[in-house]
Image: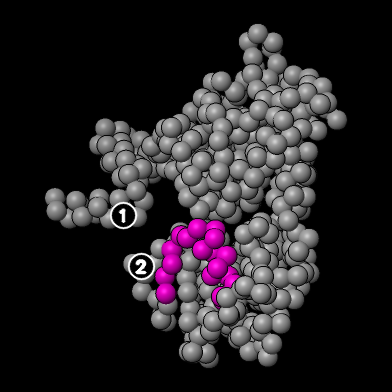
Amino acid sequence: MSAKLEKLKGTYREEGPRGVARRLRDKSAEIFYPHLGPKYMRFKYKPGTPLIADVLKADPDAQTLTPAAARKPGQKLNIAWVIPPVGPGGGGHTTISRVAKQLIADGHHVTFTIYDNASRQLNSEAVTGLKEHYGLDVDMLELDELSTADAVIATSWETAYAVNNVGVDPETGTGPHKFYFVQDFEPSFYGIGTEYVLAEQTYRFGFYGVTAGPWLTMRVNEYGMQAEPFQFGVDLDIYRLDPANAPARKKQVIFYARPLTERRGFELGLMALTLFHEAHPEYEIITFGQDLSKFELPFPARNLGIITEHQLAELYQESVACLLLSLTNVSLLPLELLAAGCVPVMNDGENNRMVLGETPGILYSGVMPTSLARKLIEAVENPDIAGNALAISQAVENRSWETGLKQAADIIVRKTTGQ
């Protein structure tokens, strides 16, 4: 019993109360429903997956969208977002919140709905989380209240199943316009299997895509999905380089370390930094993005875990370079790093270049540890680190979020009003 209790305590530390609830549900399911098998039950209660009942209703081969109500240009719209549970430090939730704020500023009524297959997040928890972590104050709706909205927006593959099953308003016989806010190619989050193919099928649901950059537009087009991209930006009020007040660059490099997120190439980063440390042991290595206190790293490092935006901005201003791996769609970090004068060292690929282009200051690299380490070494051996920091910061002075947010909001409004 003590070993099981310790394991449960470990789950609580790693995954919180919802993780404990999921484990207990899995074990109960194995006891009471042994004929279904543990794998089936794990999927049934697995975070980040749709409810099985919603999957069983989906049939892309016979997909017929409900007729959407006509809305006139200039009319105030009721726009509902369906999102995963809210927590701190979520890049996806950050971008969603920014677009939602733009829609609110344009005069539309915005609501949110939480879709969760593990342990249900209460609306009160979500409201508090959106306020505290993302500065957004909105009303919450239940799924069965969405049929009267003018537009409903799926924001991840599991929420797409929920939006797919939003029906018609019984009074009008029409339903909402359905959108898919695509921030990454989510099938690649998994090995080939059930989750991969179920995520892939959501691009055949007939929703109109609003994609984070043109690489994702290209990917969803492969499934026959219509979509338009919006431009990535950077919050220049937070991430900036003020030469008069900026802290001095320290002999330190930073690593965006997310071992729980496969697409961030955690192990590749560790191997590259091992080689870098051998070449420049005088440079401190700092990790951020996830708590690594339980990991044994192959080099000395300072672990910051999840920190605030303002703490990130200061860290970027003090550091020479950041190792940042994006193996699917590009991260939000490169432009933020550049704005603060920190050199992003990134894996090369069309997923990154199609969004960021030839933005000055990015050091693209092959994906092997030797190549990544070589680029980190190049960054710290630059004879004019301060001058380079100023130059790359100035190169993104016109990349504020204003353009991208207006693009995203315009797509939603324009398609809902039939323009």
Q: Is residue 315 above or below residue 226?
A: below
Q: Which residue is mark 1?
A: 13
Residue type for callout 1: Arg
Q: Which mark is residue 293?
A: 2
Q: Are marks 1 and 2 in contact (CB under 8 Å)?
A: no
Going from N to C along the chain, the mark reached first, 1 or 2, is 1
Q: Residues within 10 Å of mark 1 (few under 14, many from 20)?
A: few
Q: Quadrant of residue 107?
A: top right
Is 371 or 240 nearer to us in this picture?
A: 240
The residue positioned 48% from the left and 78% from the top of the image is 285
The residues bearing labels 1 and 2 have C-alpha atoms spaced at a distance of 12 Å
Q: Amino acid at mark 2?
A: Ser
Q: Position of residue 51 (x, y in %)?
A: 47, 33
- Which residues, given as a range, are shown in magenta? 302-319
Instruction: Please tell me whether residue 78 belongs to the stretch shown in magenta.
Output: no
Q: Quadrant of residue 23?
A: top left
**Residue 227 placement (x, y as % from top left):** 76, 42
Q: Is residue 262 above or below residue 250?
A: above
Left or right? Give the position of 411 relative to 1: right
Helix, strand, or loop for circle 1? helix
